[in-house]
Amino acid sequence: MIRIENLSKSFNGFEVLKGVSCEVATGEILALIGGSGHGKSVILKHVAGLLKPDRGRVLIDEIDIWSLSRSELEQLRSRFGFLFQSGALFSSLTVFDNVAFPLRETLKISEDEIRKRVLTALDQVGLRGAEDKYPAQISGGMIKRTALARSLVGNPGIMLFDEPTTGLDPVIAHTILNLIQSIHKAYGFTGVIVSHELSRVFQIVQKVAMLHEGVILTVGSPAEISASQDPIVRQFVTGALEGPIKIR
Amino acid sequence: MTWIRKLGASGLFILRRMGRMGLFFTKTCYYLFRPPLKISWILKQIRFIGTQSMFVIFLTGAFAGMVLGLQGYYTLNRFGSTALLGPMVGLILIRSLGPVFSALMVTGRAGSAMTAEIGIMRISEQIDALELMGLNPYRYLVVPKLVAGMIALPLLTAIFDVVGIFGGYLVGVNLLGVGKGTYFGEMANYIDMQDVLGGLYKSFSFGILITWICCYKGYYAGFGAEGVSKATTQAVVLSSVLILFWDYVMTSALF
């Protein structure tokens, strides 16, 4: 379970998060929605322990991650999978080696077993045949799918997706969200997904939280958020030009 | 009073940066002595810093030795001491010029690439990805480079010294007519093991200095391409200045 309590964070005097609180139950996926620059990725990085909060706590299975020692935090992080907006693939490694990297470095398993698991993961994301290519030789969609395979290959208990479909064509975007859904069904990870692909994302998540101006404005099921009468939520979900949301 | 405030703020900023640099080095040393060392990563870095720098070291070593031979001959000729050309070239190269030139060449060739590599990994979230796999970026990115620098720099310096001495020989003996036996024979009388070891200690410490500064600058590179390019420039300038400063400190202490 992920629990965020009263999380606040400022950068260069600008307060991005102003006391964010929310909870994701085990096996559930939460969609974090909200305008660009409102701090959604900042929340994900706090959950992953990449950023330290100014105030507040992030609890993973009731353990405050900033109360852990460096080695305990490293151990906890090995339970995480994180799909970065950019993919964050290692440019000097092939697709195969990128996916194999966490297995080779964190698990003591044979090269045959690694090969089997990597090829299965590449099969799942439809990248069989591209294993010898380098990140510079593949498309944006393939980079995202490789990154997805890498984040899932260790069967993580917690998955964090930072805009997994941004910059992709609708078909590839749909494919990636389908993959996330099928892998969630198969492995039942706990997840947080930041996305602007609302209609499709609402079909694969159990809960939605809307972040607005540094606070969680509302939390509910996809159906409740879609039917919300809150003018801010309504404007964001429908994409209307007129409304209380100021463009910045 | 504004200028006092500005001065204080600048002082605090510099102190904070120095503290961060110190902490970076301390953490690197901590992971250096905490197994497991990533041997394959270290070997890869030795190849990059050492083997791939050999051509430039060979070239600069030869020309530095040739210039020393030429300048040294004309200077010593004024005092009728051309017989001391060999020891003069040897001492200058072994004690100072070899370690300093090798370090400057490695900074330009490998140090700048180290900063750019780590900087790009930082801005493209590859370092974050490493951390999220439960892997320590110091162990994977910084320690191998530090160890490789400590091993490669003394070896490159030794090559630079040998090639430089032969460069001086080429000019002094083959072009200007200094006796073959005199060139090398006098060397044995004037150069001792302390000179050789002093030069190697220097190059060892330069290996640490270059990798420390260049990795630090890459690790804390700013945003975007501009941030990486700025970090690379700063790494090369700071490393070069510190090499010359540290050379003075070591020379005072060792010889």
Image (cartoon, helix red, strand yellow):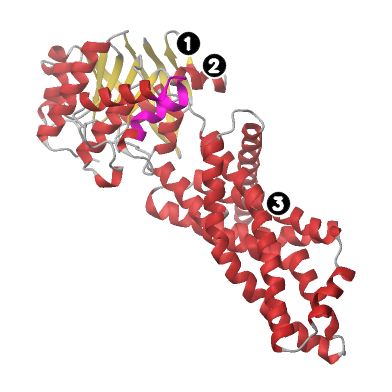
Q: Main secondary structure of the magenta part?
A: helix
Q: Residues in magenta?
A: A97-111
Q: Residue visible at 15% across and 25% down?
A: A198
User: Badge 1 is on which residue?
Assistant: A63
Q: Is residue A105 magenta?
A: yes
How many numbered marks, from 0 up? 3
Q: Residue visible at 26% across and 46% down?
A: A137
Question: Residue B78: x percent and y percent?
Answer: 84, 91
Please state which amino acid type lies under the numbered disc 1: Ile
- Picture quadrant of residue A217: top left
Q: Residue furthest right?
A: B189
Specify whether B48 is left or right of A244. right
Residue under disc 2 on the same chain as residue under disc 3: no
Judge depth for marks 3 and 1 and give the one in front: 3
Q: Cα distance, mark 3 to mark 1?
A: 45 Å
Parent chain of label 3: B
Please tell me whether mark 2 sits on a helix, a strand or a loop: helix
Question: Residue A30: x percent and y percent?
Answer: 26, 16
Specify whether A16 is left or right of B63. left
Judge depth for marks 2 and 3 and give the one in front: 3
Please state which amino acid type lies under the numbered disc 2: Ser
Parent chain of label 1: A
User: Badge 2 is on which residue?
Assistant: A67
In the rendered view, would you say B140 is above or below B157? Answer: above
The reply to whether dot 1 and dot 2 touch (C-beta < 8 Å) is: yes
Mark 2 nearby-residue class (10 Å; few <14, some 14–19, many ≥20) = few
Can residue B13 be seen here? The reply is no
User: Badge 3 is on which residue?
Assistant: B204
Q: Cα distance, mark 1 to mark 2?
A: 8 Å
